[in-house]
Image (cartoon, rainbow, N blue to C red):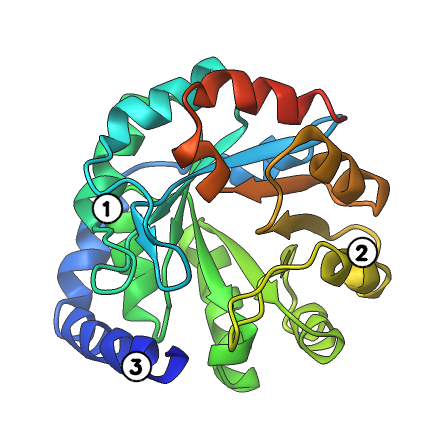
Amino acid sequence: MLTSILEAADVRAARAQLNTADFERAAAAQGEARGFGVALAKPGLSVIAEIKRRSPSAGDIDADLDPARQAAAYESGGADAISVLTEPEFFGGSLEDLRSVREAVALPVLRKDFTRNQAQLWEARAWGADALLLIVATLGQVLLEELVALSRDIGIDAVVEAHTAEEVKRAVASGASIIGVNNRDLATFRTDLAVAETLAPGISPGILSIGESGVSSPEGAARMREAGYDAILVGEALVRSSDPSALVAALKSAS
């Protein structure tokens, strides 16, 4: 499945490459990004609430999701940032979702996608992203380091995502200031909170850390906080919730 996802991502990345100059101009017109890292550095456990219509592991979660309305509910519950899936073929997202969310809330917004080249960093900022995802497992080390450096030049935060101890080492070596540890196995899509708990010690002091995937309750949030994470990223549980605002508030209470 990951191979198919990356093949589709490469097609989109090549398309973005053709429009780099346009994205650079549009990015410059965006002004200063909202501080994603600043939001995560506040005292207590920060919650990054995600807009996610479907996934390869869960199928349709909410095919009719209204991104702006959902994001507003997250904000009212006390979310510190919003993550938006923009991958279209396997997750049902779009860059239009990203823009509508950013216009609907005052929070920093993360573009969550399979970033493959430099043009997509400019594209992310052009569409209003304040941060974007870089997945260690899908990028060579030289390119990863180039993308982390470029993100700083653009003024957009990079969340460098790891799944294993070796990937955490690579994330640290890339110069990342924010590292996310994903509890979901990219091959099997199974989640286990013990992954983030086990890998937390490998994240150097001074680097902001995010526990991603698998958290659906205050108890799970507390486990991530006790493991030393500054933030959690929660998607499916919030989208399925009948009261996402209340669930955000409950997750934040774990701090």
Location of the C terminus (image quadrant): top right
Location of the N terminus (image quadrant): bottom left
State the residue position of label 1.
127
Which kind of residue does numbered mark 3 sit on? Answer: Ser
Residue 21 is at least partly visible in this image: yes
State the residue position of label 2.
197
State the residue position of label 3.
4
Among numbered discs 3 and 1, the one appearing first in the sequence = 3
Q: From the viewer's perspective, is 179 left or right of 86?
A: right
Q: Residue 172 placed where, x, y %?
A: 71, 68
Q: Residues within 10 Å of mark 3 (few under 14, many from 20)?
A: few
Locate residue 170: give its quadrant: bottom right
Asked which secondary structure carries label 2, the reply is helix
Q: Which residue lies at the image location 55% right of the left edge and 24% below the top edge?
A: 248
Are dots 3 and 1 in contact, CB under 8 Å? Answer: no
Q: Gap between marks 2 and 3, in whole Å?
A: 30 Å
Residue 78 is at least partly visible in this image: no
Are dots 2 and 3 in contact, CB under 8 Å? Answer: no
Count how many numbered circles sit on residues in the image. Answer: 3
Q: Residue 60 placed where, x, y %?
A: 29, 50
Asked which secondary structure carries label 3, the reply is helix
Q: Gap between marks 3 and 1, in whole Å?
A: 25 Å
Asked which secondary structure carries label 1, the reply is loop
Q: Nearer the viewer, mark 3 or mark 1?
A: 3
Which kind of residue does numbered mark 2 sit on? Answer: Glu
**Is 178 placed above or below 6 here?**
above
Among numbered discs 1 and 2, the one appearing first in the sequence = 1
Q: Which residue lies at the image location 49% right of the left edge and 33% below the top edge?
A: 81
